[in-house]
Image (cartoon, rainbow, N blue to C red):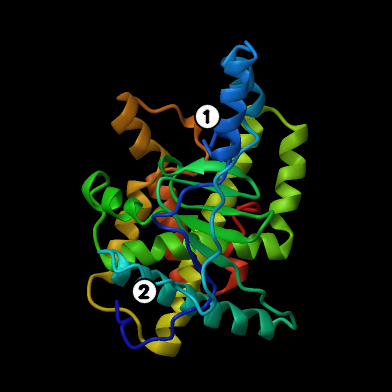
Amino acid sequence: MRWRNARRSTNVEDYRGKRLGGPGLKLGGGVIVALLLAWFFGVDPRLIMSVMEGVQTTQVEPPPPGGVQKTGGPDDELAEFVSVVLGDTEDTWSVLFADRGAEYVAPTLVLFTGAVQSACGRAGASVGPFYCPADQKVYIDLGFYRELKDKFQAPGDFAQAYVIAHEVGHHVQNLAGTTEKVHAVQQRGSEEESNALSVRLELQADCYAGIWAHHAERARQILESGDVEEALGAAAAVGDDTIQQRARGHIVPESFTHGSADQRMRWFDTGLKSGALESCDTFGS
């Protein structure tokens, strides 16, 4: 993928290497004094500990303005790469929304290590990249890309770009009101019906990722030989059937929440070839 001379997005928050704020006891001076007083007056220190538990938190410091915070770590180039991909999605979707008389409000990309607190709740790196509609942010532990390459056998920079574009696709769904409508129906339906709707939502995000690639290539010629195959390989690698077969040794289609490998590849390819939002109607197909 041609990206090194492209615009970097400034909508990036870099929390890598910082501790996550959340429940937990921090032994500051006040806590130590309280424990000493408890011991002096014959109070069980465990009672003090139980009272203080959940009160003290470690706060995450906000990043400086202006985009990706330089950390000097080995992932800095990768952080720059994802900021370029995010910037390119901003350019693409801004034009597509403007063509329809609407304004595109860009999401924020949050880089974290290990775990993160979003408006949708606390999440560990094991959940993979995700989008939170409540705060309109995309979250990713860049270690996922090593897993994508080594565990899922889906290497390549455009495979990595596909991941970001897919999550931005969820942001587009949120802006369009699709996410809210689907969630409302899911609350009234059975688990199987909810899963089926989740699959359609994910496949549409795949299609939107393909739409980004279509227009980015037409406008800025970002694709190099093998890039499309990398994206299709990543889509197949994170298909529900691929993951279940690897983890369980068998496939349970009714439990799918993201779609099969074939479906994910097909819908990404649909968006890539058509470039039209109308082609991504996974709910009507």
State the image quarter where residue 11 is shown. bottom right
Q: Residue 80 — which label?
A: 2
Residue 191 appears anywhere in the view: yes
Residue type pointed to by label 1: Glu
Q: Residue at x 61, y 81 (%)?
A: 94
Q: What element does badge 2 sit on?
A: helix
Residue 15, given in percent of the width and then of the height, sits at 46, 59
- The reply to whether the C-beta atoms of the residues labelled 2 and 1 are less than 8 Å apart is no
Report the side of 113 relative to 134 (left or right). Answer: left
- Is residue 73 depicted above or below 223 in this figure? above
- Is residue 258 depicted above or below 191 in this figure? below
Mark 2 or 1: the one toward you: 2
* Disc 1 packing (10 Å; few <14; some 14–19; many ≥20): few
Which residue is outermost to the front?
Answer: 40
User: Where, quadrant-wise, is the N terminus in this rendering?
Assistant: bottom left
Residue type pointed to by label 2: Glu
* Disc 2 packing (10 Å; few <14; some 14–19; many ≥20): many
State the image quarter where residue 18 is shown. bottom left
Q: In this orientation, which residue lies closer to the viewer: 250 or 91?
A: 91
* Of pointers 2 and 1, the one earlier in the residue sequence: 2
Residue 136, given in percent of the width and then of the height, sits at 64, 61
- Determine which residue is flagged by label 1: 254
> What is the spatial separation of the Cα atoms under label 2 and label 1, in whole angstroms?
39 Å
Residue 52, given in percent of the width and then of the height, sits at 64, 29
Residue 228 appears anywhere in the view: no
Q: Residue 119 — which label?
A: none
